[in-house]
Amino acid sequence: MTVRDNLALIRRQVEAACARVGRNPADVRIIAVTKYVDAARAQEVLHAGIGDLGENRSEQLLEKYEALGNRATWHFIGTLQSRKVKEVIDKVDYIHSLDRLSLAKEIEKRAARPVKCFVQVNVSGEATKHGLAPEETIPFIEQLRSFSRIEVVGLMTMAPHTDDEAVLRSCFRRLRALKERVQEFGWAHAPCTELSMGMSNDYVIAVEEGATWIRIGSALVGSL
Ligand SMILES: *Cc1c(COP(=O)(O)O)cnc(C)c1O
């Protein structure tokens, strides 16, 4: 399947999901996760009309950036080691994996401008997953008030690997509820309007539950 065909299918699913819950499909943005594919395939994504690309490793982000530069909006979606921050910070537009103070400090030190960050939350509590526990999230965001280079635009999560719709739905719902609690504080540094949730196997449910950014890899670009 071409990226264009895959994208048409995903867009139809997103529109149908939005229609079911009374959302505007324009409020759901697609990040093409290109970690499985080469720069030529990533280029195909841009041609198909998706300008947001996501990578989960700094090496791959740099490689793709080399080829495509600022023709794309770059999202860092994977675990970010503090020592890698300086290599990617002037290239990425969004970081989806802010989950600890040491990383926030490194971003603050290295960034020349405010960086849009999602705080990653481990809603499901699986030991293998990164992210803050839900109850740690608000105190963590509060601590970022004095950071001039970090703007908390939203929350991000990865749902458990399951086909159990109820489990997925409850995970996404809890992230949305947490986001709404953060918004109630009205913090200038944390508008927290966005929800980064939903991947190839669960994006329809994520959209029904309020996702504003879905991160799609295999269903969009394949996994060559
Ligand atoms: C790989 C990855 C995705 C996309 O995964 P697919 O299941 O291929 O859509 C989304 N988010 C993160 C954080 C990832 O690492």
Image: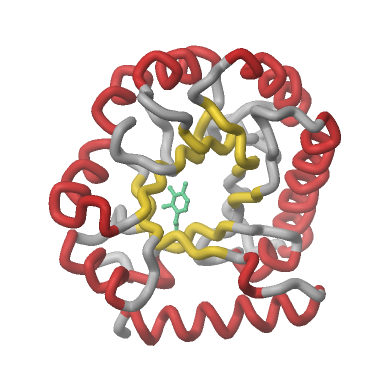
Instruction: Specify the quadrant of the image occupied by residue 219.
Output: bottom left
Assign ligand 1 to one image quadrant.
bottom left
Up-down: is 173 above or below 154? below
Side of 182 where 132 appears, left or right: left
Find residue 105 and report its horizontal and vertical position in percent.
Answer: 47, 13
Q: Position of residue 82 (x, y in %)?
A: 37, 19
Q: Does 10 appear above or below 129?
A: below
Query: Where in the figure is residue 76, as x and y percent of width and height?
Result: 40, 42
Give the colouring mode of the picture: secondary structure
Whether residue 108 sits left or right of residue 157 in the image: it is left
| Quadrant in the picture for the C terminus | bottom left
The structure residue drawn at horizontal position 59% and vertical position 50%, both measured from the top left corner, is: 196
Which of these two is toward me, 158 or 196?
Answer: 196
Q: Please give the name of the residue rendered at 70% of the width and 29% of the height, measured from the top-left corner.
A: 188
Residue 217 placement, left or right of 142: left
Query: Against 71, is 84 above or below?
Result: above
Observer-nearest residue: 218 or 189?
Answer: 189
Q: Residue at point 71% right, 26% down?
A: 137
Q: Quadrant of the N terminus?
A: bottom left
Residue 66: % across, % down: 14, 48
Number of numbered callouts drawn? 0
Image quadrant where residue 124 sits: top right
Q: Is residue 57 above or below residue 21?
A: above
Q: Quadrant of residue 49?
A: bottom left
